[in-house]
Image (tube, rainbow, N blue to C red):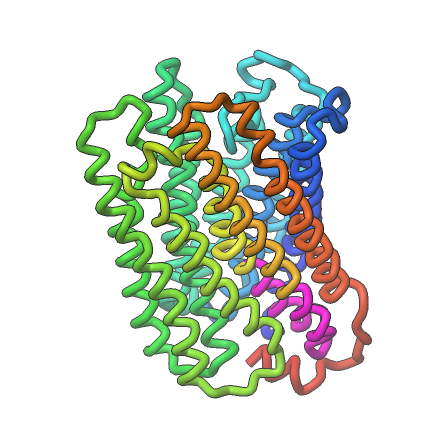
């Protein structure tokens, strides 16, 4: 570890992993409710558990991005973080807001209250006071990291990362706009959800992945930066107008069917470029880095993102196909693998890389860590394939043959049991990851040669 302020990232990692655990446990519970619908129905209704599952996903991923930024920006900028105290204050605000959200959801507090009540918009259910807290935390973060970068060395990695993080914060402001007209509401709702995950989050992903490739492969910075600019250009070009694939059936003009279909088809390109970039960098670098687990997660991130966000997204993005598949289990299949590949695996790659450096250990328990990768990834891929078959059957029975929703759900029971089994594998993989990163590992008085090599 070159800079003392990089230790800030450790606190963010702990909070992110705690929320990650909550997310997957809620996901497993939801999977079981699909096969036993009355399970905990009076104590923890399905809609509340789903809010906790999706909200904890978004919050822990963003917390992970913040932690990654606090770790890599000092190295890239060659100076300490502007204010460590502000960084910890930001984390405190996020934790308090998260706790407030959980209590509000679980006990259905302040229902209907403009300021304190749950807003009921998917992914953006947080009460307004929590949203305001998120904005304050984001402003603190942006001030802190921007001042650090402005006073230090500027690199393509930090420039693209800051562009993504500023975009993340500014687009979140649309979460405060909640018009009564449902079509208008959905149009602006996608400004947050789509332009996050298929826009500015892709910039964050590309910059963090570029940093990891620099550290793990030893390839020249100039080569990495050229790839990075190409990926970012294609991501923004396709992702912004690609928002149109959400506008097909919500009451917007018909030209969105063509805009959405064309530009959404192009969204495969940046994810293919990121996968190619990761493997080409490893091939060019030929560096035997001691932290092989971090390299595995990095390559897995790029590969699974291409298949989850790229291939599975393309499967139902054309408006002629989407007319039948919209809102079926095919959507769930795409969402699960896309989020896992692009962002979950990215954060776990960063944590795997930075944890031994920050904790003063040689790379530890790599076999367990890599086993957790294969367990989680295999479970998620099996879940995706299972949901894809379930969605295909659902589309035919419900949208083509006209069977009602409940009858179709009964026909999908075997797929839901398989999905639950794959969820068990994912949760076991998460627990294995937590054990490999947090619990064991012999503390050393001074960092070993592997840690020193990783920090260089």
Quadrant in the picture for the C terminus: bottom right
Tell me what residue is drawn at x 64 percent, y 47 percent: 418
Question: For this view, does 160 lie left or right of residue 119?
Answer: left
The magenta stretch is 347-372
Instruction: Name the residue located 45 percent from the left edge and 41 percent from the top edge.
Output: 392
81 or 246: nearer the viewer: 246
Q: Please say whether residue 418 is visible from this viewpoint.
A: yes
* Membership of 359 in magenta stretch: yes
Image position, residue 314 (x, y; %): 34, 49
Is 137 drawn above or below residue 181 in the view shown? below
Task: Measuring from the top left, give residue 398's x and y in whole percent.
Answer: 45, 28
User: On the rendered structure, is 128 left or right of 101?
Assistant: left
Q: Nearer the viewer, residue 321 or 78?
A: 321
* Whether residue 55 can be seen here: no
Q: Main secondary structure of the magenta part?
A: helix
Residue drawn at 27 percent across, 50 percent down: 265
- Residue 412 as seen in the image, left or right of residue 36: left
The quarter in which the N terminus is drawn is bottom right
Q: Does residue 440 show up magenta in the picture?
A: no
Residue 363: x and y, percent?
68, 77
**Residue 349 position by quadrant:** bottom right
Query: In the rendering, at what x and y percent does residue 220 appear?
Result: 38, 82
Is 305 placed above or below 47 here? Answer: below
Query: In the rendered picture of this protein, how many numbered marks are placed on residues?
Result: 0
Residue at 51% over, 70% down? 75
Is 147 on the left-hand or right-hand side of 365?
left
């Amino acid at each position: 570890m070159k800079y003392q302020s990089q230790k800030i990232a450790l606190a963010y990692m702990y909070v992110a992993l705690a929320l990650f655990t909550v997310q997957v446990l809620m996901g497993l519970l939801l999977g079981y409710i699909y096969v036993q619908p009355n399970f905990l129905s009076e104590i923890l209704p399905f809609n509340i558990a789903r809010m906790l599952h999706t909200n904890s996903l978004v919050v822990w991923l963003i917390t992970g991005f913040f932690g990654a930024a606090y770790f890599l920006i000092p190295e890239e900028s060659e100076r300490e973080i502007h204010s460590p105290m502000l960084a910890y204050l930001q984390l405190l605000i996020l934790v308090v807001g998260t706790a407030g959200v959980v209590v509000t959801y679980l006990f259905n507090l302040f229902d209907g209250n403009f300021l304190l009540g749950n807003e009921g918009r998917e992914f953006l259910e947080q009460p307004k006071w929590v949203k305001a807290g998120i904005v304050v935390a984001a402003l603190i973060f942006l001030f802190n990291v921007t001042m650090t970068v402005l006073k230090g060395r500027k690199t393509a990695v930090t420039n693209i990362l800051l562009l993504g993080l500023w975009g993340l914060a500014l687009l979140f402001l649309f979460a405060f706009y909640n018009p009564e007209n449902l079509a208008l509401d959905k149009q602006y709702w996608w400004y947050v959800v789509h332009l996050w995950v298929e826009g500015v989050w892709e910039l964050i992903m590309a910059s963090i992945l570029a940093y990891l490739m620099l550290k793990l492969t030893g390839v020249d910075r100039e080569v990495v930066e050229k790839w990075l600019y190409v990926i970012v250009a294609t991501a923004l070009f396709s992702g912004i107008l690609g928002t149109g694939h959400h506008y097909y059936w919500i009451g917007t003009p018909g030209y969105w069917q063509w805009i959405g279909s064309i530009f959404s088809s192009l969204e495969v390109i940046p994810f293919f470029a990121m996968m190619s970039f990761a493997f080409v960098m490893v091939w060019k670098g030929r560096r035997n880095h001691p932290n092989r687990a971090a390299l595995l997660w990095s390559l897995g991130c790029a590969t699974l993102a291409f298949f989850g966000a790229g291939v599975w997204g393309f499967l139902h993005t054309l408006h002629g196909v989407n007319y039948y598949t919209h809102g079926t289990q095919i959507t769930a299949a795409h969402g699960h693998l896309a989020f896992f590949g692009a962002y979950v695996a990215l954060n776990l790659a960063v944590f795997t890389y930075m944890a031994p450096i920050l904790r003063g250990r040689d790379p530890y328990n790599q076999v367990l860590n890599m086993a957790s990768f294969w367990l989680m990834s295999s479970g998620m891929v099996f879940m995706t394939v299972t949901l894809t078959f379930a969605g295909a059957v659902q589309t035919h029975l419900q949208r083509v043959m006209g069977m009602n929703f409940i009858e179709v759900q009964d026909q999908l029971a075997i797929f839901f049991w398989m999905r639950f089994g794959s969820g068990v594998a994912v949760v076991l993989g998460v627990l294995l990851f937590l054990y490999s990163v947090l619990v064991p590992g012999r503390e050393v008085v001074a960092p070993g040669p592997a840690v020193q090599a990783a920090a260089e």
